[in-house]
Every structure is written in structure tokens, then in C-alpha cells.
Image (tube, helix red, strand yellow):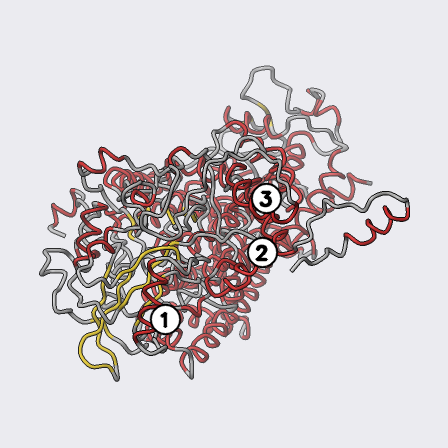
Amino acid sequence: MATELNSDRPQRQRSEQQGGEPVRTTIRNLELARHVARDAQRVVAGDLSEQEFYERYHEAYLHEFGVDSRAISRQEVPNVASGQGAAKGAMAERPKPMINGPLSRRAFLMLAGGGAAAVALAATLGRLVPQVAYARTEGSSESPRAQGAVEGSQAVKRIQMGMVIDLERCTGCLVCVDACHRENNTEEGVHWMYVLAYKDENKEGVNFLVRPCNHCTNPPCVKVCPVMARHKREKDGLVLTDQDICIGTRYCEVACPYGVNYFQWGEPNPDTEMIRQHGRKDYRGRTVEFNPPRGVMGKCTFCPQRQDSEGKRGTTSCQQACPHDAIHFGDMNDPNSAPRQYLERRRQEKGGYLSTFRLLDDLGTEPNILYIGHQPSRSAKQVDGPITYEDWGWVDRRGDVLEGPRPWFMRVFGG
Amino acid sequence: MAEQSREALILKTLGRPSPKFFLLLAVAGGAVAWFAYAWSFMLRYGMITTGLADWGSAGGVTWGMFIGGYIWWIGIAHGGIIISAAVRLFNLRTFMPVARLAELLTLCALSMAALFIVLHLGRPDRMVVSIVRAFPRAIFSSPLAWDVLVITLYFTLTATYIALTVRQDLQAIRGGMGNEAAVGGGRARGGYFSRSRLGSSTVRGYTGGQYAGRGQLPALPALVHRVLLTGYKPEESKKVERMVWWLALAVIILAPLFLHGGVIPWLFAILPSMPGWYGGLQGPTFLSIALTSALSGVIIIAYIFRRVYGWEDIIPDSVFKGLTFFLIIFAMLFLWLQIQGLVTGLYAAPVGVEAVTRAKVHSFSYWLAIGLVAVAVAYLGAQRLRPSLFSPHRTFVVAFLPLVATLLEKSLFVVEGIMEPRFSLYRAVPGAYKPSWIEVSAIVGTIGLVVMFFALVPKVIPVVEVTTDEDRREHNA
């Protein structure tokens, strides 16, 4: 697998002609080099701390060069990958992403990238205002489909949390919807987890589509956000909204093909006891959890409050609540994770053939919810399920209840 | 002598205002005050007061008339400066009298567009800090960041352009071009610094109101003139000429390719989640709409000035005939692009595209918009073919039709795009939308602001270029 870089050759020839030792420090593993280069850019951009960067490639460096003298803490890298309980090492103690340090390098890279004047101005301003780490949309190479390439190399696999949802087991009881409401304190009609009951041609009875956020590997909502409030968390691939940065353009909502975003049009519910105690900040100190304040976008978060905790890591409220074990949550890139194991088991049960799909896969979003079952056709129509939202005492269609106070003249004229 | 009277006519706008002027200000100010009330109401209670809602399970529309109004104003803005830049680059002398009016229209319409973006935000309080912090990285991915960049760029280009050309004019009306004494305190010619007291100065040829003959300007305009003329040197005019030429070139390249034919339609055209928006047709469509509405706007404003100040000789019929000619071309382009969209969207289109095209075809507002443009094209075309039908007044009236139509069409484009998303399994799709009183107030209020702008700015600077090309040539020689 050790591929020689082309640029390596002339240099080596030259040094041999000069009678010196051949240069040994070049990176010979192209795959590794690519990963290191990409993550180095992330370090410069502030998405990844140097510590995390060093840790990520420590093993690979040792394998490649036999030595890695860079400063890494000997603390074991937490493994969120295999889902429940497998992780060691406290996430909370990890260093926050380093952003202020490499500003000059960062400014230089951006200048090289173009837009020189504006960037120089912004970089200057960046020195003045406290910086926030902006995560960025990931490259597509981490998608489960492209996984072979990643697995084949020495590079460390990227963790991407996702779900395998077994629609054949779903009964449309809406317990997951209820659990999400309780956990995240979302407003009336805001269904971060939503279950669509539908009728379809050539399918008998009522079918279900469980719709949390897809936490896409290539999320359009992250791309379009002008303030980078919507971002993809490096640690586990969650797509989150920074509630302190969001300015409420709602561009993420129109760019998302799945309709998972719910804006906070009015005043939010008062915080629950749990939120008051826990706060809304994740392990990086960014405000991304629970229902957002007024004027800010909200959506399914895959419960970062759980992913950052010791006890509940690798679970979500909906997954834990599902009485039919239809939702399986974990790292989609890890063959040993709960969802991948479940998928494998179901595949074997079905004699090697299992119908699965990802929603609107053709749009290139690389969604991370894998459904077991059949995809609804274009002529499918949503119907009332066996248990309706009204049965639970909720509002299904939020638009009907979104009504603010009326101005005096409307009250006068009875409008 | 003819030159003198032309100048005097142009400077009439700086004269003492009539009672009608104050009436106009009061009406426009009333609209603005109402808008301010509506906005404060929205800020107080949140966007829940707008009637917007989430698409998907909630059955609403996420972007509404704020975005429709934004595209409308920015379309008017983009066309204005293109007209002006074309005058300079391609020497379209006919339109010289309306060049500055078009530039001013660009400046204020652009500000209105920016205002609509602020109105649209859930958290306008954080806007500046969030955008500035994220900008260096967001600019590589977010079309809205591109948008912020091009609007800022465009505003800077236009403001610079106006400031540069106005300087020459102000100097000319103060003491004549090339007269160095005028700058150095030339009392002999009643120059700018002939009075030591701030806020009063005399103007050659200025005969407005009580300031007959060699009139004295009121304090505020005089102060503005003084600021605008900071550091003026007579020999700068040659350089200014070059700078303005390059600015015009930049505008002619940037505006059609990257502004209204680029970034603004790309806000929508790049999103496959909304089939009504997605696709390469949006660029040309947006540009045709921008130019149609901008030409209509310039016709309306030019006619009002001509009427109010008796500028039949300053803005002659030929200006209206010329503007009408281009208006017909771009309005026909607009109609033609609509036909392209309808035929490809209905014949054998993918499901999502067909759904949104069908919704469009069944919408009354859409046909109203198309009808208004068609009527305007038909009438203006007839006027062109049979010159006896032509009158500036009728042209002025007809010019309102495309303006209304473009506002309708663009708002509908935004709303229907969201009503018919690609993922239509939700029962609550298509969502429901009705413009709220706040959104309508914003449209009315911004029109009021533009009216106020065009009432007040002519009180300070001449809105038609005083310096003619002959003057410049003579001066440069």
C-alpha cells in the first residue's frame, strides 16, 4: 500500500548524487497523507484541536515512521464509535478546539484562497472579537459507501452517528415523538421526531416513515448558512445549530430537502428542570442543545446532551423510548456499532436480502438514517395513523396554531 | 444663454419647497411611520406575527413577502446603474439626462433591499457580529454570504460613482470649471467660500425660490456641498473621468453576470430541495425582471421630475421613447422565459417540477402578473409602431404595470417554491400562506422611504448632470 509520491523521486536522486543519505522523512502512504493534509487544514481552520489531531494519527505515524515525537497525551482516545458504554476517557476534559493560536497561518491560507481584502479585514476583526470554532461540512469521503477506501488505509475512521430505523417494526405509536418532546422541551406542533403514516400504491394498509434529522454527511443546511451557526460537529458528525450565533435567516430550512427544521417564531416554552440544571452547552462550550430561543432555528439534534455524558452516551431519547426496538443509534461507519450489527442480523434473518433505503438519496446529501423497509413512492399520501397526534393531545400542523398577538386595529375591526 | 437657462432649470430642484412638497413628505412620512409601527410590533412579539410558518409537517411557508420584496427592490436597484453605466460606456447620449436619477434609484432601492433582509431575520440584533465573524469562511460556501458581499460591493460602486460625478457638478455650479479662484476663495465670482459664515453660499445660476439671481443656499445643502467638495482640485476632473469610466465598466460586467443574473438567483437556483427554484433558467429570468422593473422605475421617476419642474427640454420625449424601447425588449424577454418555464414544466417534467408548474398555472396572481406585463408590452409596442399614440404621460401610467407585476411574480416565485418541495409526502404540503399586515406595511413603508429620498435628495444635489460633455471637453482641453 506504500505508494511513493512522485515529487519524492527527483529529490532522492539529487541527494543520492550528492552522496548524502536518501531523505527518509517523506510520507509514503498516499492515503494517509491525504487524510493528514485534510485534517491539518481543519486544525488551521479551528475545527480540530492539535491534541485531537495528534492523537488521531499517532498510531498511523508509528506504523509509518516507527516514531512519533509529537506531544500527545497518553490518555486513551474515547471511542464513541461502538455505541453504548464502550467509551473511556472523559470528553468533558478534552481541550477545547484551538482557534486563536494559528490565526496568522489561517489568515495566510485564506488570503491564498482568494477574496484577499475582505478576508484580511475579517482576520483583523477576528483578533478583536473572541472567536468561536466553526465546524464545516465534511468531505464526502467519509460516507459509509466510500468506506472501503477509508478502511483500507491506516487512517483513523471518522465517527458518524446515525440510525438504522426498522420501518417493518414501527407501529406508529408515536412514543418516540413523545420522548423527544419530553427530552427537548419543544413547542406545540414542533416535532423534531416526526412519524408519517401513509398509504401507498401496491402496499396494503398503513405504512410508516419515521423522520428525525438525517444528520447528513453532506448537509445542504450547513453549506448555505451565512453565519456558520449550522455546523457539523467534528467528534461524532452531529449536525447542530449554534443558538448563540444563528441570526434566523431560515436558509437552512429551505435548503433542507427533508423539512426537519422548526423555527422558533415566538416565545419558547419555559425551561424544564432538566434544562435548567444541564444548560444548553455541549462539551465544546457551544450552545446547541434543547429547544432554541426566539428567532433561532431548531431541529433534531441526536441529543448531544446524551452523547457528551457518561451514562447515556450512544443513546437518544427516541431510540430509548421506542417500545418496538425499531430505532438503532450509533456510529454508521463502525461495523461493530449497534445499528450496523442490527442491520447485519436482520439481513441474515432475511436470508441475505433486505430492502433498505435512504431518503432522497439522489440529492447527494448522504443522509445517515438507513431505513429497513420500502421507500414511499411519489404517489404516497400521508394519512391518519392508528394513533394520531391529536390522540396524544398535540398539534400536528403547527402552522394552524402559530398566531401572534393582534394589533389594536385588527381588534377594533374584528379582523 | 441657452446653457445658463438649462443650468437654472436643473437647479430649480434646490429651490424653496412648495406646500405640495410638504404634503408629499407628510404622506410618505406617514407610510414610513406606519411601517415603523409594524416593525416594532414584530420586534416586540417575534416573527410569529408575520403569518410565516415552517414548511413540512407544520404546513406553512418559511420565506414570504420579505424575500419577495427583497428581490423586487434589488431588481430595481440593479437595473438603475446598468442604464447609467451604459450611458457612460456606450455613449448612449439620449439617456444622459436620466443617468443620475437612475443612479440615485439604485442607491436607495439597494438600501431597501438590504432593509428587507434585516426585516426577514429572526435575530437582527446579532446580524453584524455573526456575519463578520463567520464571513471569511462562510464566503466559500454560503450563497447568502455571497449576497452580503455583492450588495456591499454594489453599494460601494454606486455610491463612489455618484460621489465622483456629483463633485464635478457642484464645483461647476459654484464657480465654473477650471476657475481656480473659485476654490481659493474667489469672491469675484461669488465662489463657494465667499462667505465666512458656515451654511450660506451663493450659487451661480441658482434662481430657486427667494434665492433669485445669484442665490444663497440654505444651511444644510451648503454643508453637504462643502463636505462633498472636500479637497477638490480643478485638475482632478480628468482622473475622475477615468475612474468613473472604470467603475462603469465594472458595473456593466458585474451586474448582469454576477449580481442580478448571478448571486441573487443563485440563492434559489442551487437548491434541488425546491424544484420550483432549481435550475439555470433563474439567472436569465431574474435579470429580465430586474431590467424590466428598473426601466419602469426610471420612467416613473423621470416623468414625475419632468412634470414637477417643467423639464420638457431637460428630459425630452426622446428619453421616454428610448427607455420604452428597452422596456419592451426586456419585458418580452421576461414573457419568453416564462413560456420556457411553463412548457418544460408541464410537458413531461419530473414530478416535483410538474407540481410546482401546475400550481403556478392555477394561480390567479401569476396570470395577473403575466397579464400586466403583456398589456404593457402590447401598449408600448403599439406606441412604438404608431408614433401618434405616444405620450410621456401614458408611458408613465403604463410603466406602473410591470412594477406591480414583478413584485407579484417574485413574491409568488418565493412562496410557491416552498409550497411545492421535492419531498411532498407531508399532508401539510403544500403549505398555506397569506401576506400579513406587517409584510404589506413593509412594502408600503419602503416605497414611502424611496419617495422621501427622491423628495429630499434633489433639495441638496442636482439630480441631472449640470456639466455637459461639451463643458468637460472644453475643460480638459
Give the CA separation, mark 3 to mark 1: 34 Å
State left or right for residue A287 relative to residue A327.
Answer: right
Q: Judging from the image, what secondary structure is the residue with disc 2 in?
A: helix
Give the CA separation, mark 1 to mark 2: 39 Å
Chain hosting mark 1: A
For the residue pair A154 and A131, the one nearer the viewer reads as A154
Chain hosting mark 3: A
For the residue pair A110 and B32, the one nearer the viewer reads as A110
Amino acid type for the residue under numbered disc 1: Phe
Q: Is residue B28 visible?
A: yes
> In which quadrant of the rendered view does residue B237 lie?
top right
* Disc on res. B258: 2
N-term mark: 3 or 1 = 3
Which residue is found at the position 18% from the left and 47% from the top?
A182
* Disc on res. A40: 3
| Labels 1 and 2 share a subunit | no
Does B142 sit above or below residue B194? below
Q: Residues within 10 Å of mark 1 (few under 14, many from 20)?
A: some
Q: Position of residue B100 (x, y in %)?
A: 58, 46
- Number of marks: 3
* Disc on res. B192: none
What residue would you read off at disc 1? Answer: A357
Q: Judging from the image, what secondary structure is the residue with disc 1 in?
A: strand
Q: Position of residue A292 (x, y in %)?
A: 29, 43
> In which quadrant of the rendered view does residue B22 lie?
top left
Does A413 sit above or below residue A168? above
Q: Position of residue B321 (x, y in %)?
A: 56, 63
Which residue is found at the position 55% from the left and 21% from the top?
B200
